[in-house]
Image (cartoon, rainbow, N blue to C red):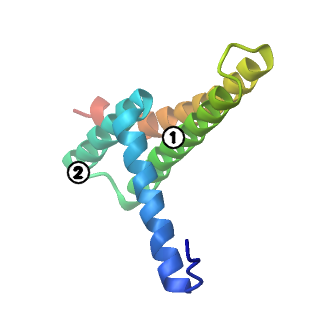
Amino acid sequence: MKNDHSFITGRLKSFKYAFAGAYKLITTEHSIMVQFSIAIALNIAGFYFGISKEEWLCQTLAIGLVLSVEGLNTAVEKIADFIHPEYHEKIGFIKDIAAGAVTFAALTALAVGCIIYVPIIMAL
């Protein structure tokens, strides 16, 4: 395989692989499917309720945070399962830590969603 050292074509290939990875996450991982569906629903809600530019920024960052950390968690789990397919206490510990990171991201996103939408819904 010939290495392509061109900056532009190298970056285009990187984007190709990145989008392929995002597609694989969205189409094969159930937790990402659920979180992506919630992200779509929140974007629809944002348009429906006419949230502010600042609220859009916070919502977008929160969604990106959750999807990104969940993707990294999935990668950790896949690597761990590849390296040690049968149960191992240390692998379980590593996977629990990665899942804990997703929990922090999800709780942060939940807080952002509540800050944005609870006052809107209460005012209805």
Residue positioned 40% across, 44% down in the render: 24
Which callout, 1 or 2, points to the residue nearer the camera? 1
Residue 65, x across and y down, in percent: 53, 46
Q: Residue 76 at x, y = what percent?
A: 64, 36
Q: Name the residue under label 1.
A: 66
Please tell me which residue lies in front, 80 or 106: 80
Q: Residue 95 lies in what quarter of the image?
A: top right
Q: Can residue 119 be seen in this view?
A: no
- Is tag 1's residue or tag 2's residue first in the polypeptide sequence? 2
The residue pinned by badge 2 equals: 47
Q: Is residue 10 left or right of residue 24?
A: right
Residue at x-position 31% and y-position 36% = 37
* Residue drawn at (59%, 83%) of the image: 5
Mark 1 is on which residue type?
Val
82 or 105: nearer the viewer: 82
Quick check: 26 above or below 56?
Answer: above
Q: Which class describes the residues within 10 Å of circle 1: few (<14), some (14-19), or many (20+)? A: many
Image quadrant in which you'd find residue 31? top left
Position of residue 120 measured from the top left corner of the image (x, y, whole percent): 30, 38
